[in-house]
Image (tube, coloured by chain):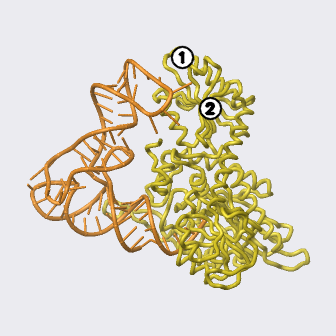
Amino acid sequence: MATNITTRAKDYAQWYLDVIAAGDLADHSPVRGCMVIKPHGFGIWELIRDQLDARFKATGHVNAYFPLFIPMSFLAKEAKHVEGFAMECAVVTHSGLESDGAGGLKPRGEIEEPLIVRPTSETIIGHTYAQWVQSWRDLPLLINQWANVVRWEMRTRLFLRTMEFLWQEGHTAHETPAEAEEETLRMLDVYSEFAENVLAIPVLKGEKSAAERFAGADRTYCIEAMMQDGKALQAGTSHNLGQNFSKAFDIKFQTRDQKTEHVFTTSWGVSTRLIGGVIMTHSDDEGLVLPPAIAPVSVAIVPIYRKDEEREAVLGYARQLQQQLAGEGAGAKLVRGEIETVVQPGTGRRIVLDLRDGLRPPEKFFHWEQRGVPVRIEVGPRDLANGKAVVVTRVDRAKNIVDAAGLTAAWLDATLRSAQQALFDRALAMRTARTFVVNDYADFKARLEGGGFFLMHWDGTAATEARIKEETKATIRCIPAAESLATADGMVALREAGTDPVSGAPSAGRVVFARAY
RNA sequence: CGGGGCGUGGCUCAGCCUGGUAGAGCAUCUGCUUGGGGAGCAGAGGGUCGGAGGUUCAAAUCCUCUCGCCCCGACCA
């Protein structure tokens, strides 16, 4: 058992922090609310980024980069937007530093118009699109950017809510409302497919209520995931911005029938928060558990030996296994200190051989286990003599002795696939077991403490929603897109009319209530 | 931003109440023994006690201010 990790049962919040520390993912920075993403954590982000980027390209988008600083006046142009973000903007008011006369420094000159550090880029991009778009022939404009943004948060948590975070934000402009809506939903589908197939996180697709909507959007769609403590995590959002920003920034175009109209825009994003979601969905009391698709190291080979002559023989055996697992055409071996890595490009085969002499095998087992490595292979003199190897899979910590000859690239691909599937299945089973139908407000309140998604009728009014939030801290996570959903109470139809148990008013269907991160 | 808790070698903490000039375990380094789930022995290095003021002959310890972290609330990707 891991002694450096608090158990989930004892203290879930502390467990989360312990897993990040043990997994070598991130550190707190000297600046409140910010984090240093360490190489292993960033390696996960790179895999997320690359696989998402490929999906954006496949749906016709291109990348560009817009500036970090936005003139303060820009934010004021869209009323709801400024209302939503004003309180969390970092504002740059001075340039330069000078001595404060006491051995320290103070800001020097005040600048004419304060700059804000982007909390999101709708405004600067709206301004730019106004210059780029003249005619319907310039549309659609399908652009994404990978960037950092800053939101001045009161309470922060590593990955889940930091003052600065990394994300992508897609910004598109279209000729018609229908095209904008189609784009908004297309990207929601991209997120959903990505979350489930790459992150192995089952998500609910749906629309946000007006209260939860993005500031400046006509409609906000989201994917919502359930963490192991039963709380909801908004994992991605896609917004149909209608003409709100095109009117604010005067993004006009000449239509096919010679008229002038404002474009219809969308925006959509996911962030480093996804890493927090992965941690809280899959990890266990032993540390990080990573889906193979985003595991910077997918296999760790740990050699075991006593004497020098054993060492040479075992290392030869281990290296041969490493090459065999990587398959033909693998990249050159990368030697970093006492760790040798072989990667097969375009696959999930990222295999390290742990040659560190200072650590004993059990310590290496813990090392790779806590970093979430999906497969560990142990080879020692006994295995060498018998042509075997010990294979341990992280998802279930199952240990098996197998024939070394069978440890091929094809075997590895299949093993990683099944680990990926097992994680998804486990997470889905967990969500289903903790998704409940409730028809009574008192019942809802009573069961909320235990966590989970609660499918309850809602009359559609902001007043009822606000009351529930006030009284229970639960919010409407989404109005599900699906017709029905698997729950602990069986398959439940979501679109059947009913009665809101809080207000007693008629309801068009059930929505998902939960406490959220 | 409100309430609570905590800041002492890299990490976890003792010492603080009752001031007298800093300790333990783990980690690190060296050597030997080891090695299939967090090793043993021997030796070594490493701390302006979060920071700034103040009280005092003397401050990790008492007082004031400040910064940061964690938890709970309001806000949020």
User: Is A471 on the left-hand or right-hand side of A122?
Assistant: left
Please tell me the numbered disc located at residue A310. Answer: 1
Is tag 1's residue or tag 2's residue first in the polypeptide sequence? 1
Q: What is the quadrant of residue A72 in the picture?
A: bottom right
Residue bearing mark 2: A400
Query: Secondary structure under badge 2?
Result: strand
Circle 2: residue type: Asn
- Label 2 Cα crowd, 10 Å radius (few <14 / some 14-19 / many 20+): few
In the image, the chain rendered in yellow is: A
Residue closest to the eye, A367 or A489: A489
**Spatial distance from mark 1 to mark 2, Cα to Cα?**
22 Å
* Nearer to us: label 1 or label 2: 2
Q: What is the quadrant of residue A319 in the picture?
A: top right
Please tell me the numbered disc located at residue A68. Answer: none
Q: What is the quadrant of residue A272 in the picture?
A: bottom right
Q: Position of residue A110 (x, y in %)?
A: 47, 71
Circle 1: residue type: Glu
Q: Quadrant of the C terminus of chain A?
A: bottom right
In the image, the chain rendered in orange is: B
Residue A362 higher or lower than A77, as above or below: above
Q: Position of residue A102 (x, y in %)?
A: 30, 62
**Residue A324 in sight in this render:** yes
Please name the residue shown 74% across and 56% down the image.
Answer: A193
User: Is A157 on the left-hand or right-hand side of A478?
Assistant: left
Please name the residue shown 58% across and 39% down the image.
Answer: A397
Q: Position of residue A230 (x, y in %)?
A: 57, 61
Residue A430 higher or lower than A120, as above or below: above
Please name the residue shown 45% across and 28% down the image.
Answer: A358
The chain letter under disc 1 is A
Residue A411 higher or lower than A288, as above or below: above
Residue closest to the eye, A114 or A99: A114
Query: Secondary structure under badge 1?
Result: helix
